[in-house]
Amino acid sequence: MTTVSPTPQPAMRLRELVFGAACAAAVRAAARLGVADALDDRPATAKELAAAVKTEPRPLERLLRALSCYGIFAETDDGKYVHTDMSRLLREDTPNSLRYISLWCTEPWTWEAWPRLDDAVRSGRSVFDDLYGKGFFDYLHEDARDSAQVFDRAMTTSSKQSAQDIAELLDLTGASSVADIGGGQGHVLASLLEKHPALTGTLLDLPTVVANPDPRLRKGGPLASRVRIVPGDCRDDIPVQADVYIIKNILEWDDESTRRTLRNVVAAARPGARVVIIENLIDDSPSMKFTTAMDLLLLLNVGGAKHSKASLVSRMADAGLEVRDILVVNPYLHAFECSIPA
């Protein structure tokens, strides 16, 4: 009797990998159609789901069968479909939903950019100017507003999910002020202020970003009296003094921008101040498949890069920061505890 190995042979695995676009497209289709939202805790047939999401039953069944091969939904012995842990993450109402992250990583422009990866590897720069005649963020806000909205919702979801982990991890005993540099809408800052009632905070980011901060930080919000919101570009100047500086997921630009940001922090901070740099890493992480993929996407769209532990420590040292410790925030993030030399 012939037995089948549970691990695909190299040729089969490579075939599966080169059809990776089909899996990504299937996830996107399910998210856009709202299939996960239509399926509750009761098993449903493809016909029932098709009626709920207004599709043809047979093509939807083919989509569900493909997704089930990857553990996204599951098919029962009687031909019905049920949720899995992954399919539930595509629901809009699920805590830590990945619906908008899934849509963001499969936006229409990504299908134009990925086939140009060999060009980006040859040149070491973004392919966006060649594709669209303008930079990535200009393209998003001028020509792809729907995609920009998906980006904003994806980043908001991601920030909210990690903010609580960061607040639980960081010991801010003895600190009276914290500054979130390039902090987006301020989800991390809000979580830190909620946990530490005596703390005051500053949020610095581009004017268009801080114009719409976390509701807790806005005028009339529960934390508004303890927050100062500063419009600015941390690559140009950081006019903020604090006991603790938080820099999360913004050191992904070109090397010169990263150097300028770190040097601006060192120039602004008092001797002995703490600087906590939080980043995804492309090494020493259980999320390497995700972060290395994001690293390649950054190369394509902005010419940026995710860091290895060594490359980030090197840039911190070059800027004059003293690295004290490296902490694991969650499977996706590491926190580098640094200080300004006395």
Image (spheres, helix red, strand yellow):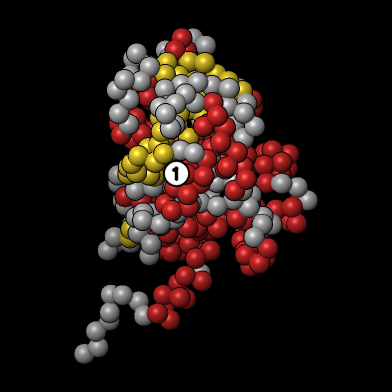
Residue most extreme to the right? 133
Res 171 quadrant in image: top left
Q: Is residue 24 left or right of residue 126?
A: left
Nearer to us in this view, 157 or 197: 197
Q: Amino acid at mark 1?
A: Glu
* Residue 83 x, y percent position in the rendering: 33, 50
Judge by depth and name the residue closer to the eye, 101 or 254: 254
Where in the figure is residue 262, as x and y percent of width and height? 53, 37
Quadrant containing the C terminus in the rendered view: top left
Q: Is residue 4 above or below residue 34?
A: below
Residue denoted by label 1 = 279
| Quarter that holds the N terminus | bottom left
Q: Residue at x 43, y 53 (%)?
A: 310
Q: Is residue 46 above or below residue 175?
A: below
From this viewpoint, is residue 236 visible?
yes
List x then y, in percent, for residue 221: 46, 13
Q: Nearer the viewer, residue 222 or 90?
A: 222
Between 137 and 257, the one nearer to me in the picture: 257
* Quarter of image, res 339: top left
Residue occupying image coordinates x 53% and y 63%: 21
Residue 258 in the image, given as x and y percentages of width and height: 57, 43
- Relative placement, left or right, of 322 versus 83 is right
Q: Is residue 42 left or right of residue 188?
A: left
Q: Residue at x 55, y 29 (%)?
A: 267
Is residue 54 shown to the viewer in this render?
no
Q: Is residue 20 left or right of residue 10?
A: right
Q: Residue at x 35, y 76 (%)?
A: 8
At numbered mark 1, what does the secondary structure look like: helix, strand or loop? strand
Furthest residue toward left: 1
- Rendered image quadrant of residue 192: top left
Mark 1 burial class by Cα count in 10 Å: few <14, some 14-19, many 20+: many
